[in-house]
Image (cartoon, coloured by chain):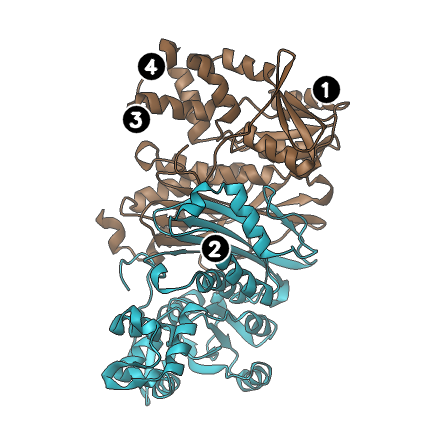
Chain colours: A brown, B cyan
Amino acid sequence: MPTLNVLTEDDLIAAIALELGSAPHWLRAGIGDDAALWKTPRAHLNVITTDMLVDGVHFRLASTTPGALGHKALAVNLSDIAAMGASPQIAVVALGITDVVDEPWARAFYRGMADLARRHGCAIAGGDIARTPALTIAVTVCGDVRRSDVRLRSGARPGDVACVTGPLGLAAGWLRHVQMHGDDAAAADAVTGNDGAGLVADDALRLRAAYETPSPRVTEGAFLGGASATHALMDISDGVSLDGARMARASGVDLVLELATFRRWCEERPLRAFGSSALDLVLHGGDDYELLAAVDGRAYHHLAKRFRARFQTALAQIGRFERGSGEVWVEDQGVRSAHTPRGYDHLARTR
Amino acid sequence: MPTLNVLTEDDLIAAIALELGSAPHWLRAGIGDDAALWKTPRAHLNVITTDMLVDGVHFRLASTTPGALGHKALAVNLSDIAAMGASPQIAVVALGITDVVDEPWARAFYRGMADLARRHGCAIAGGDIARTPALTIAVTVCGDVRRSDVRLRSGARPGDVACVTGPLGLAAGWLRHVQMHGDDAAAADAVTGNDGAGLVADDALRLRAAYETPSPRVTEGAFLGGASATHALMDISDGVSLDGARMARASGVDLVLELATFRRWCEERPLRAFGSSALDLVLHGGDDYELLAAVDGRAYHHLAKRFRARFQTALAQIGRFERGSGEVWVEDQGVRSAHTPRGYDHLARTR
């Protein structure tokens, strides 16, 4: 499109700045200077994370909206901040654009991102724009956390309950659905899932939202980091199978995944439409952006009760940690078998 | 190359972590966790900046080395940190790789980056890796600065001297040289510049180093930020013409570029080989990574003397700021004319 080609970089940055609105008072300098300035609360630590999303690898430009893309590019980073028990403060965006991007596209993209940022008290404070052969988004988020609230993935202990902040497999369910039905699925009012089972419109929308506009568990992460019973925390964006194995290995303990909770999710809407393949989505799907916590076994029930009261959703037990050397096991109706972790590998060519 | 395709993401991250060496003691968590943790000195502000480099736009993979690329990708960000009067603390790297990248390439890339980081007390604390159609590097650096040492681009006042931390046009000279002689120029022992003038090997190496492995003016930026006579500071990576105009506009003053200093650089080695086109390189070339400062006119000579004593190089006057509305003028042997700023625009297809 010609719009962008006559725009200078300074013009586009001015349009984006307009979209982002006025900076919060605690931001000392932002867009328009070489770098942005902000202050960390006293006795807090800084946290930083970065994630890169690429068209054709992490998303398909043709089947998403710029607003959803802006949301997701920030959400995946907020999820990493939440996984440390921290709160986000500031984000910068390196955007690699192609000819598809014109000014309205860019404004919608930054609006989607700014809406999510605002909800979590995060300021978008600057970035960089370049031309790339495929649309590429690298967002970096800094946050802060009270020293005593930091939770790493390496803190799980034998006897801890493994639990997650929400049901898994929904985002992967959307991808599977699109795989089966093509991009038309995105527009359909009522669509059909695997095995001839019906995937009603509401369910399709829920799957799509889980994939396109995931809710990073920022408040939940701060809540869990603030609880002394939480020994370890991480996000499971690559799937609970692979990320659970990473927590087990980092902590030097074994993880036993109990299939009961997973099976329950598979039997409920919207996943039951996927029939026998639902369990695969839940275990290995990835893109979930829920948090995995290792919680002291004696304190789990009390914490889960407080969690439900606060967030109106379950802190769902999916297994337990045991003495071991970082292996993962699956326990199904009392029978235990070895589990080979697998999930999203960012260097693999296909999922 | 097949090497990477059998590597998992976890394997590659482990190899990179090995290359980066042990983390400094003040880094609380880094590679391997969801995010990295660090502490800002009390009463300091945080600074953040991000820059994206793309193969075919900002560099050509075929005519550079992975080590130089790692160096440059970090250097351009350190330059932005320096431009705020700040010191770098921590960097994260989002790397979009292609099939060209194998493990030795990745290790050399991170080694080049880590060497530069170490020199400036900066830790490389994490990142992300994805597949992209063109090699893409998005580095984000956080630093810190004493509240009173912050210098923005908007602080220039009438009567200030405009000065830079080093000679300009060298990086652009290398690009021009490669344009004229092709990539063979990179390997040549002795090469020939424009107008038949000789560009001897030493000069070619100096131009190439200015382009490929620029030295970010981190210590110089902290020195200038610490001087009360410094009213404004920015880096001039897009060329002094365009970036000088940005400082003038942000400060609401006019900038008068005095050509005397520029002409002197053009008559000296290595730029004199470019003959009459040298002035264009100096004014509009970009990629210089020197700092532009607005220094109180009454204090400039004293500051420049201290600068020379400290850094063994000139804080070169290139003009002055005057009452006005953000215009740029050029003054050549007493004759003043209007100047149309032009330089590197990141959205333009070609330079």
Residue where numbered disc 3 is placed = A183
Q: Amino acid at mark 2?
A: Pro
Q: CA distance from mark 2 to mark 4?
A: 51 Å
Image coordinates for residue B146, horizontal then vertical, percent: 64, 64
Q: Amino acid at mark 4?
A: Ala
Image coordinates for residue B162, horizontal then vertical, percent: 45, 78
The quarter of the picture where residue A177 lies is top left
Residue A190 has which mark? 4
Residue where numbered disc 1 is placed = A301
Position of residue B258 in the picture relative to residue A228 (left or right): left
Residue where numbered disc 2 is placed = B104
Q: Chain of mark 1?
A: A
Q: Looking at the picture, do discs 2 and 4 lie on one chain?
A: no
Q: Secondary structure at mark 1?
A: helix
Position of residue B272 in the picture relative to residue B28 (left or right): left
The first of marks 1 and 3 along the sequence is 3
Q: Secondary structure at mark 2?
A: helix
